[in-house]
Image (cartoon, rainbow, N blue to C red):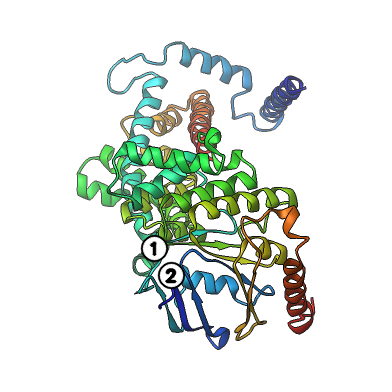
Amino acid sequence: MRLFRYSQSILLAMLGFFGFVILWWLLTYFLVKELPQPPQVFSNLFELLKKPFYDAGPNDKGIGWQIYYSLRRVLTGFFIGSLIAIPLGFLIGMSDKLRAMFNPIIQILKPVSPLAWFPIGLAVFQASDKAAVFSIAITSLWATLLNTAYGASSVPEDYKNVAKVFGFSTLRYLRYVVVPYTLPFMLTGLKISIGIAWMVIVAAEMLAGGTGIGFYIWDSWNALNLNNVISAILLIGVVGFILDYFFSYLQRRVQI
Amino acid sequence: MRAYLEIFNVSKSFGSYTVLKDINLLINKGEFISLIGHSGCGKSTLLFIVAGLTEPTTGSVILDGKEVVSPGPDRAVVFQNYSLLPWLSVWDNVMVAVKSVLKGLSKKEMEEKVKHYLNLVGVYEHRHKKPSQISGGMKQRVAIARALAVEPKVLLLDEPFGALDALTKAILQDELLRIWEESKLTCVMVTHDIEEALYLSDKVVVLSNGPSAKVFDVVEVNIPRPRVRSEIVKLREYIETKEKLLYYLTTVLRKSA
């Protein structure tokens, strides 16, 4: 029964994918003739994936390298951002005074497009690569910060009472009550953050140039190679899906 | 002679709403006391004041000659909703309390203690499970083990069996009675169950209806111990005390439901 439901959902997913390709084909065949049709794109994607890590000089690298550079920037920025956001989130969540102090700044900076920070990064680091990482770090701050703070501020009274009655030290209270309670909230924040970071990196690399999947798309567009652009879009989607899946898996693991 | 646990002129107001008014109670060492009253009369609030979790507006609580100013393990609480930490195993739930209270013990002694109390309440074989994997009755057993393991001066029980089905409730009452009879620990229990109060307590403190609840009467339960449920219900003393409490709660302190 479970196997049946499982194979049924795979079948339906394939059907949906198939329908999407047909629609794309029809649209590009009859209406938007400027765009490449599925067979061209898929054969192009196949060619790209045959040699993903070729390296023919600084301006001609395989798509695997491009994704690698982008992922490296995203993970570095995400790591730095999370390293700031998580402790700050706990502090803000546990202290009403700190919350009152920081909340207005967070609310004002949060809606700013991460790319607006790009010139600041350029000015400070004098390197477009580091500026991109800087933008990603800023991107990764907010969702993690706010979700962690929300978790830490909503520890149920019952658990607090347990800690008080049994005389938990501050450290023990953090270790056995606040952190485990906040963990699922924090992971939700991290999952949102990495999703946005992966979206932002494409735009950041279009600005930064040099390497990365965003640069690759812009470079392909300049060479009027739309086959490459659409292939890259599909790969970006797949990588984003994998990142999301990984954090969903972690979330399920800490679910009580 | 001073009583072991003294509650002097305790009142509690939340804003302009007065929950408790001038509560005075003296509880002797080794006594089992029940606080009974209609819901909303503030009996749990009174228990939380003794626990130090709620600050009284006026008055004071004195335990063993020292004023209660904050929560502490000398007044261990068994909460109504168990309040086990869901991310810790049964073992760790008790161990974390032992570790933070009985700091002088060696690791081995702590383990012995946890094992002893888990065995006492009959959940030792479930020690590796998480609270979500055991029944409500089991959870409350663990909560009782946690409270006993820190060797409190007073055990405070806040409607400990309120959420359990009748059979589980009866079994846990038997176990609590057995444990109490062995340890002679001073116990204060909040309940709204007259039979439970009679079966377990030496005295039943009846609170009047809120707002501004007062001690309406303190009823002595002169039923000899050890008590056996099926035996005591036939005693004249049991029947008369039960009728008295029923009369208080359903006639004098009648509340439109």
**Residue B113 falls in image quadrant:** top left
According to the picture, the residue beneath numbered tag 1 turns out to be: B72
- In the rendered image, the vertical position of residue B257 relative to residue A208, given as above or below: below
The three-letter amino acid code for the residue at tag 1 is Gly
Are the residues under badges 2 and 1 in a single subunit?
Answer: yes
Chain ID, mark 2: B
Q: What residue appears at the point 31 percent right and 49 percent down from the top-left corner? A: A84
Q: Can residue A139 be seen at all in this image of the molecule?
A: no
Helix, strand or loop for disc 2: loop
Q: Indicate left or right for A234 with A113 as reference.
A: right
Q: What residue appears at the point 42 percent right and 58 percent down from the top-left corner? A: B152
**Residue A72 falls in image quadrant:** top left
Residue B177 position in % (x across, y down): 60, 54
Helix, strand or loop for disc 1: loop
Residue A65 position in % (x across, y down): 36, 22
Q: Indicate left or right for B211 with B257 as reference.
A: left
